[in-house]
Image: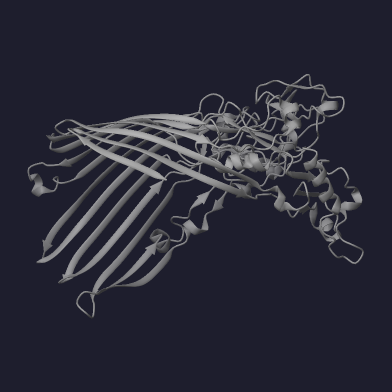
Amino acid sequence: MKFKANYLWGDHYFTAGYELDQLDVFNLFAQDATGTITFDGLENFQAGIARNISGSGSFTGDINDAAAEFSRSIHTLYVQDEWEALNGLTLQFGLRYDWYASSDRPLRNPKFEEKFGFDNTQAFNGLDILQPRFGFSYDAGETLWGDTQFRGGVGIFSGGDPTVWFANNFQNFGGAIGTVNTRFGTSPSCTDADLQVLDANGNFTGVPNCITQDQIAQATGNNGTVNAVDPDFSIPSLVRFNAGFSHYTDFDNAAGGFFDDWNLQFDLIYSKRRNAPDFVNLALTPTGELAPDGRPIFSPINPLLPGCNATFNGDLRGGFSNVDLAACASGGDDEDIVLTNVDGKDGSSTTASVILSKLFEHDMFNVPGSVNLTFGYAYTDASEVNPSTSSTASSNFEEVAVSVINQPPLGPSQFANKHNITVAASVTEEFFEGLQSTFSMFFSARSGRAFSYVFDADADEVFGDSDDEARHLFYVPTGPNDPRVDLSQLSAEDQQALFDLIATSGLSKFAGEIAPRNQFRDPWIKDMDIRFSQDLPGFFGNDSFEVFVDIENFLNLIDSGSNVSRRFDRGNVNEGVPILGVGLSDDGSQFVFRDFDPGLNNDIDVNSSLWAIQFGVRYQF
């Protein structure tokens, strides 16, 4: 529902309103609900000997009983005064207030509260944010060689709907869904015999019943994965400042008027994130041991295990104290994930753009026509901690490149192209009266996006992560004799290829250190698209035809080596580019490098690299 009122009083134009966004949710989302079976190698697959069997199920065995069901409302009040303070000067003052309301809360999990000292029932109710804003526009009129208009503003902005994140908490309260995994011992009733998934006749026997029974037992015992919200969670927002101007040139017809009527636009936008979202796994605790490069090693802790007297520190990222790993380490992939706010710098972005355009009209050879030119450049420098692009708590936690778990570092955004150059041109002629012939071209060149170099997914076992994601930032060896690294499992050829990659990629700048997050970039991408169209007469006077041909990626059409979109292949969109596998030496003093695969480091985006031609006819009546 939306209500809006406008009121004009002298030089003031007032706007006020109220909005209500109400949502009733029935959300059933269960990963791995039909079970997943993995095998070590083709021979084991052919023999039906599973390496691991995992699955998720509800507390009744019927997956439909695991759905989240709740309602929430977002209320908005706003008021604005647009004041024409002076001739050509307009000021805007605004205030917006958003607040959430809901009588629904996730079901309380007593074991979660016993572990961490706070409950998991935080939901929408009570969240609010006040957003003051100011803006201005000023028409300076005839100024230096033309007309100029200035604009600017500053304010607090918040947007987006976090309902999907909160839905996770209603469904994953630890008692709706049980998630079990034979590899990590979270399916205790399964035996080695259950890992044989082919019968004597070679027929697939399906996911064993022990998985279903352990899922039910885990859920009814409130032992499932818990997603929760920090009781002190604040709504994320931006403090945004913008300034810019538009200038229409007038040089009194100098040089035949070539320099007149250009439109120059410049804009600068700076945004500072506030209370940016982050996701942490409460179960992960530093063991006190360090990896060879000095980063801490973690372990999932369950303080409710027999003989464990661990106490949660109260710091969402700090884990437990008084930890006896022999008694407290769960040995599993425990993930009790809390939605919270970034601890420290939230990130920011600066964008500057300039556009120069002009329409040239001419009457060459008594044939009317025009040429439209546009040149553009944009610069973006953006940083963030957790991009939070997933709909699930586990992915938002796992798919961020880190050196210290639960503390993702501030780094350049992997979604921002730092430089973006565009050129557009359109030539229109009327060789036949009333029928236009148009040729247009659009060219763009943009710098590559940022990425991180990381270890392969097996690094989770080295650093004690709760999930096998390729996200642990790569330690850059100083050379073949680096005492922190054992290269004996790499062939001489792979060792040479590894150090060649380090030398050519820029990793060598960080030799003896952990490569920082998102300090490397994909290659530049160039693209040119062209179109030709011709108007044709219709049949009835008011109708018309247009025939056209579009050529996408024209550069690649004339040279197959041009505009091939290459990017470094991320394991996942928010993680990094895996270089090689890693383990630890027996005494823990060295990384053991293995399984170097240079093929992982370069990928071609086929859809962006192909050229295509489209012919068409458009009929208007």
Left-right relation of 600 to 362: right
Residue 307: x percent and y percent?
87, 24
Name which quarter of the figure residue 351 lies in.
Answer: top left
Name which quarter of the figure residue 121 lies in.
Answer: top right
Residue 400: x percent and y percent?
60, 37
Look at the picture and state if 536 lies above or below 596.
below
Viewer-closest of 134 and 539: 134
Look at the picture and state if 110 lies above or below 183.
above
Residue 21: x percent and y percent?
47, 43
Looking at the image, which residue sits at the far top? 322
Name which quarter of the figure residue 247 lies in.
Answer: top left
Left-right relation of 264 to 289: left
Viewer-closest of 331 and 608: 331
Question: The C terminus appears in which quarter of the rendering?
Answer: bottom left
Task: Name which residue lies at 51% across and 51% down.
Answer: 566
Question: The N terminus appears in which quarter of the rendering?
Answer: top left
Left-right relation of 129 to 600: left
Q: Is residue 420 visible?
A: yes
Q: Is residue 576 visible?
A: no
Task: Name which residue lies at 80% across and 57% down.
Answer: 42
Task: Name which residue lies at 38% across and 61% down.
Answer: 554
Residue 373: x percent and y percent?
24, 52
Look at the picture and state if 382 lies above or below 311.
below
Colour basis:
one colour
Viewer-closest of 458 and 486: 458
